[in-house]
Amino acid sequence: MGFSLAGLAVSLAVLAPNAILIFFRPVDALPPTRTPRPLTWLERAGQALCLVTPALTGQEPGDPWWFAALAACIAVYLGLWVRYLATGRHVASLYAPLGLVPVPMALFPIAAFLLSAGWLGSWWIALAATILAAGHIPLAVATQRAIHAPSSTLEG
């Protein structure tokens, strides 16, 4: 174990854009969803692990093809944040599909961490990304379904 500047850069590049939500909150509220606590715990643990694991376990950067794919994932992810801002900061923009990718704001960061595991030669990063995926993807899908669920109305 040692410090990896490249690993820290990956963590910051993937997780820092979430700070946009501090200054540019959605104009509407998240719909209520019932989420199992174990999934929330997995997601939080995965987020923490993906923040620190690349910086602590990453080795010398390897094959530039890993990096090219990683950079592409990060670029798409940043583009999705631009889409969120450009479409009026609606919650639905955070969970909107991108072509055939159902929840890209959940999938692209995970893909980036998995690719960084290959680029930095650390199976620990892959494990952290897998833990994040186990919680983040199902929660994102549940939220997306709640956003698109028809509103129920009571007729009396």
Image: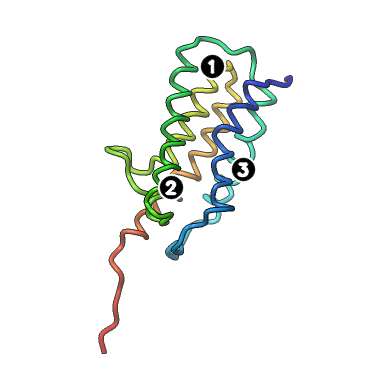
- Which residue is labeled 2 in the image? 138
Sequence-first disc among 1 and 2: 1
The quadrant in which residue 92 appears is bottom left
Amino acid type of the residue tagged 2 in the rendering: Pro
**Percent position of residue 95, x then y:** 39, 49
Residue pictured at 32% horizontal, 40% vertical: 98
107 sits to left or right of 117: left
Q: Mark 2 Cα within 10 Å, few/some/many (few <14, many 20+)?
A: some
Quadrant including the C terminus: bottom left
Say what secondary structure mark 1 lies in: helix
Sequence-first disc among 3 and 2: 3
Amino acid type of the residue tagged 3 in the rendering: Ala
The quadrant in which residue 55 appears is top right
Mark pair 3, 2: CA separation = 15 Å
Residue at the farthest bottom position = 156
Mark pair 1, 3: CA separation = 22 Å
Q: Nearer the viewer, mark 1 or mark 3?
A: 1
Amino acid type of the residue tagged 1 in the rendering: Trp
The quadrant in which residue 54 appears is top right
Residue at the farthest top position = 63
Residue pictured at 37% horizontal, 51% vertical: 87
Say what secondary structure mark 2 lies in: helix
Q: How many marks?
A: 3
- Which residue is labeled 1 in the image? 119
Q: Mark 3 Cα within 10 Å, few/some/many (few <14, many 20+)?
A: some
Sequence-first disc among 1 and 3: 3
- Which residue is labeled 3 in the image? 45
Say what secondary structure mark 3 lies in: helix
Q: Mark 1 Cα within 10 Å, few/some/many (few <14, many 20+)?
A: many
Question: 153 or 41: which is nearer to us?
Answer: 153
Residue pictured at 48% horizontal, 35% vertical: 109
